[in-house]
Every structure is written in C-alpha cells, then in structure tokens.
Image (spheres, rainbow, N blue to C red):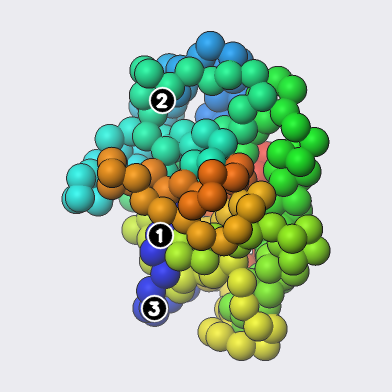
C-alpha cells in the first residue's frame, strides 16, 4: 500500500525480526496464489476480499489494511484496483471483473506484530498489447529497483533504476505515492520514491527493510483521488500497473520477503 510522499527516519531490523516479516511475507505469497486462481470475468472484488479474509485469519495473521487510516478508515482486507485505478481500490460487490481488465491486488498482513506488504497486477483474459506491455514493464521496474537496493548504495539509486524503466517505455510515473520502510508499522521511514538521482539520498544498510512499489501509467504522471477518500486513479483515464515486494537488505544483497521460496 503506497503512501503520500513525506520525509522521516529509518530503523534496522534484527535477524529474528526479519524472520517474522519473512513468515508474514509467505502468508501473502500463498494468498496471492489463491487470488490469482480466482480471477475470472464475473467475479466481484468483494469475493476476492472475502477469500483474503479467510486466508489471513486461518494463517493466524491480521490484515494490515482493514481499518487503516481515519478519513475514513480503509474498509477492505485488500486493495483491488481496476484499470485506471492506480492504488487503494476498495473491494465492492458491485465491481465485477471483466474480460480484458487489469487488476492490481495489493495485500498486507501482520504476523506476531510484524508486517509484510506486496502487490501484483494481473491481466484478465484478453488485454490490449499496450496494457500487457505496461504490466511487464512495471514488473521489470520492481526487479530493477530491488537490484539497486544493496548495502552501500543510496536511496536515489533505487528510484533512478525504477525511473529508467519508465523512461525507456515513455510511461507516466506516479510521483505523489511512494514505497516505504516497513516493520512493526506498515509505513516506516524511509520513503522510497519511484524516481531519483543516482548517488543521492540516504545510504542503505544491512537490516533495512523496504517495500518497493513502482506504479506506472500508460499515459501521463498525474493522478487524482476519488470521493471515497482512498481510490487513486489516473487523471487522464489511462491504465495503470503496480507491483510491490517487501525486501530486507542483506550482506549478500537484497532478499525478497514476499517471493516464493527459492525465487530470490
């Protein structure tokens, strides 16, 4: 779940704390597998939310999103963002998935007090080649951003790596919402913009946990907030894609805590 850009401080996690976040991440990996299998034309986003509620409860965890915020509190277990919805789409019994849709599924949970947060964008049925390419490129940008998140690099290296992928394809970058540090709170320091200049910003250290989450638009950069207080959409109505992983920076490089075992 992305947050408005602001500034703050970061904390370093101990191995036993990272282990709890890794467990939370694996709950989410299994959840996304279930949600992906359920995606089909005619399914409502409320049905996906109910599936997520059952999975998280049975895993002994709690949704990071349900009740988050205050203006108003987020009402869903997960975020379900369709087509021009960038992030924070609210699940609804009135929103049915259609053939050709893009849907971003953003999931987060708390296990023994520690958070994990991740997102994937899926193409349902036959999507346009342009939409399929957008999804692929945004996934590639996440990979590029994670590769740059190594000890000794700076935060600007992560943003620059993501921005370079968007520039290569001419996509809009969602600048008002960014990635974040994560731990006992879903949103910790530092903020992780999807743009930046190499060699600038906070130096990255072993034990720092980040949620890196590129959000690219098929059209321009601009976004707007709907009257529900949560759903962020592209200002020009173009499609958007969002990918996110929770990582820890290790001595041997970044580890994706929300990847399938063995996937890095």
Check disc 2: other Cα within 10 Å, few if <14, some if 14-19, many if 20+: many
Q: Is residue 4 visible?
A: yes
Q: Quadrant of residue 10?
A: bottom left
In the picture provided, is 4 more to the left or to the right than 201?
left
Number of the label disc, if any, that sits on residue 49:
2
Check disc 1: other Cα within 10 Å, few if <14, some if 14-19, many if 20+: some
Q: Quadrant of residue 95?
A: top left
Separation of residues labelled 3 and 2 (CA atoms): 32 Å
Image point 41% across, 25% down: which residue?
49
Sequence order check, earlier mark of 1 and 2: 1
Give the camera-side residue of 36 and 4.
4
Where is mark 3, residue-wise? 7
Image point 64% across, 53% down: which residue?
219
Number of the label disc, if any, that sits on residue 3:
1
Image point 70% across, 20% down: which residue?
125
Q: Is residue 249 above or below residue 262?
A: below
Disc 2, SS:
helix
């Amino acid at each position: 779940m992305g947050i408005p850009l602001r500034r703050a401080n970061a904390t370093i996690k101990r191995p036993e704390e990272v282990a709890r976040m890794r467990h939370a991440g694996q709950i989410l990996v299994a959840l996304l597998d279930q949600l992906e299998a359920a995606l089909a034309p005619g399914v409502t986003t409320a049905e996906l939310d109910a599936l997520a509620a059952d999975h998280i409860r049975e895993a002994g965890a709690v949704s990071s999103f349900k009740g988050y915020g205050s203006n108003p509190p987020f009402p869903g277990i997960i975020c379900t963002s369709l087509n021009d919805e960038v992030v924070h789409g609210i699940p609804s019994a009135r929103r049915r998935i259609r053939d050709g849709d893009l849907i971003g599924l953003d999931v987060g949970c708390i296990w023994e007090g520690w958070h994990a947060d991740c997102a994937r964008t899926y193409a349902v049925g036959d999507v346009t080649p342009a939409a399929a390419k957008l999804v692929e490129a945004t996934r590639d940008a996440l990979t590029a951003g994670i590769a740059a998140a190594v000890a000794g690099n700076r935060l600007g290296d992560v943003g620059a790596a993501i921005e370079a992928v968007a520039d290569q394809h001419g996509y809009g970058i969602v600048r008002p919402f960014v990635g974040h540090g994560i731990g006992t709170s879903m949103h910790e320091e530092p903020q992780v913009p999807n743009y930046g200049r190499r060699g600038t910003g906070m130096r990255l250290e072993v034990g720092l946990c980040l949620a890196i989450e590129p959000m690219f638009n098929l059209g321009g950069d601009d976004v707007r907030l709907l009257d529900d207080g949560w759903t962020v959409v592209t200002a020009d109505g173009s499609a958007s894609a969002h990918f996110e992983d929770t990582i820890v920076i290790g001595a041997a490089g970044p580890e994706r805590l929300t990847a399938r075992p063995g996937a890095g």
